[in-house]
Amino acid sequence: MERSSLMLWKVGLLVLALIKSSSATLSPTGINYEVVALMAIKTDLVDPHNVLENWDINSVDPCSWRMVTCSADGDGHVSALGLPSQNLSGTLSPKIGDLPNLQYLLLQNNAISGPIPTTIGKLEKLQKLDLSNNTFRGEIPSSLGGLKNLNYLRLNNNSLTGPCPESLSNIEGLTLVDLSFNNLSGKLPKISARTFKIIGNPLICPKANNSCSAVFPEPLSFSPDALKGQSDSERKSHHVAIAFGASFGSVFFIILVVGLVVWWRYRHNQQIFFDVNDQYDPEVCLGHLRRYTFKELRTATDHFNSKNILGRGGFGIVYKGCLNDGTLVAVKRLKDFNAAAGEIQFQTEVEMISLAVHRNLLRLCGFCSTENERLLVYPYMPNGSVASRLRDHVRGRPALDWTMRKRIALGTARGLVYLHEQCDPKIIHRDVKAANILLDEDFEAVVGDFGLAKLLDHRESHVTTAVRGTVGHIAPEYLSTGQSSEKTDVFGFGILLLELITGQKALDFGRSVNQKGVMLDWVLSLSLSLSLSSLCVFLLLSVQCILVIFDDLANVKLAESFSEV
């Protein structure tokens, strides 16, 4: 009786832990409002080339999304949104105003229409705003005058109408304002920008006290008070001086650029990582790693055909490929290769993950680095991921029986222990879930995607970064503080155990147990195939892992716990 009470008490702790996890993920304090705002922007835009395909509402961190840049101050807030020349159309959502830390908004050279959202005026940190060469309509919002930090404003080549807002004269730090080639009219306020372009607008006045009756016949680039009181001779000599200075400066600039290129090539030709011309196809090996050419991997994946997609992640898409010798591989094509985060991620994976060799870790066997592409090559896992297998049924029964699920849990635990205990510096995975556990030909668990984790210096017990992971698998402590440690992975492992027990996704735990009969059928099949004591021990182990965030058990070796199962 006493033992049964203890068992019920511990199971109660599991329910409490799940409630805490769910509230941390779904409560207002757990919502990433930047994700919500960006998804609203994506919804209102028409994206014919799927530039924004990795923008995912289930993500808690948009910093790995394509065209999104986050601040490097440790807070990880969205600081720049750059989508120039992406053939986007549709409208710009007013939710743009819900990105309070935005400093750069660059949407030039698209076909975005509709009005310019007045909510842009809420972006107090905005420094550069470029909406040029679109089809925006309506008036220029007067709220833009509240952007005290703005120094660069380009709204040229749109279909804007009405007057230029008087409020723009309140911005003191403007360097450039380009309102040319719209349908603006009325009086022009005194704007303090060093460069101010208004060519191609009807009924524009260069002075606020004159009547408007003309169109400027040539591009006008001026500081409003700079043209007063200059004689023709002064202007002529001034132009000659400018021409001479520009010519001298251009020559000096060209010499400087050539010198820098020569110096850069000399340094980088002596480093391990170097770019290979697409036509040059040597076999370059770094230890056990092979360097592939982009042409070789492009051919292996049938030009990255969508039919060969194995999965998608925050840093790229994984394709199935077949090399010339018939070897099947998984090719991970990184996105945002030219962004700081993408490049750092690539260097981290190639240099550090290749050193993490274990039976239960996905082995990196090659890479490709060119001027325009970054790719990683892994062995192909024929049985897919645990997540996909958990949903499969064979003759009405789950494809993974209880013995196989316990074996998967044990293999995953051993892989995580290796990352935590044997790697120097230790590696924190930060996104332990069934979708990141692959199955080889023997159905042995192989932990993948640990290359996307931040490396933890051996002198520290935790690291503070932008929150990364999947909703439902993130420890509440990590979600609220941004501090990741071994506890983060232990918590994720506990959620993985619940996935193995129930066959459901983490966010499905709270749904009806009779939904499609999944939960009920699984519990009934368990009762027929094993003793309930085995299930309870497995369940209690998941409770211990989930509750690790509340105590000091971060350094527990997960594999040792399975000696009791």
Image (cartoon, rainbow, N blue to C red):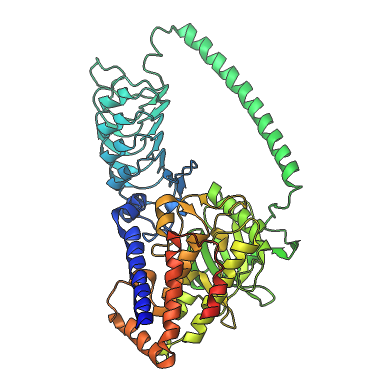
Q: Residue 100 at x, y = what percent?
A: 35, 41
Q: Quadrant of residue 185?
A: top left
Residue at coordinates 36% horizontally, 48% vertically from top-left?
Answer: 111
Position above or below: 198 against 490:
above
Q: Residue 389 at x, y = what percent?
A: 46, 80
Furthest-front residue in this view? 2
Q: Inspect this view and state whether residue 391 appears.
A: no
Question: Is residue 454 rendered to the left or right of residue 260?
Answer: left
Comparing 78 with 541, the one in front is: 541
Question: Is residue 140 rendered to the left or right of residue 412?
Answer: left
Q: Residue 43 at x, y = what percent?
A: 32, 56
Q: Residue 68 at x, y = what percent?
A: 44, 48
Question: Is residue 79 rendered to the left or right of residue 265?
Answer: left
Position above or below: 418 against 390:
above
Q: Quadrant of residue 24?
A: bottom left
Residue at coordinates 35% horizontally, 35% vertically from top-left?
Answer: 155
Question: Can you say which quadrant of the picture contains the N terminus?
Answer: bottom left
Comparing 37 with 457, the one in front is: 457
Position above or below: 259 against 359:
above
Residue at coordinates 46% horizontally, 56% vertically from top-left?
Answer: 468
Q: Inspect this view and state whether residue 100 appears.
A: yes
Residue at coordinates 66% horizontally, 76% vertically from top-left?
Answer: 327
Question: What number of labels is visible?
Answer: 0
Position above or below: 397 against 149:
below
Q: Quadrant of residue 279?
A: bottom right
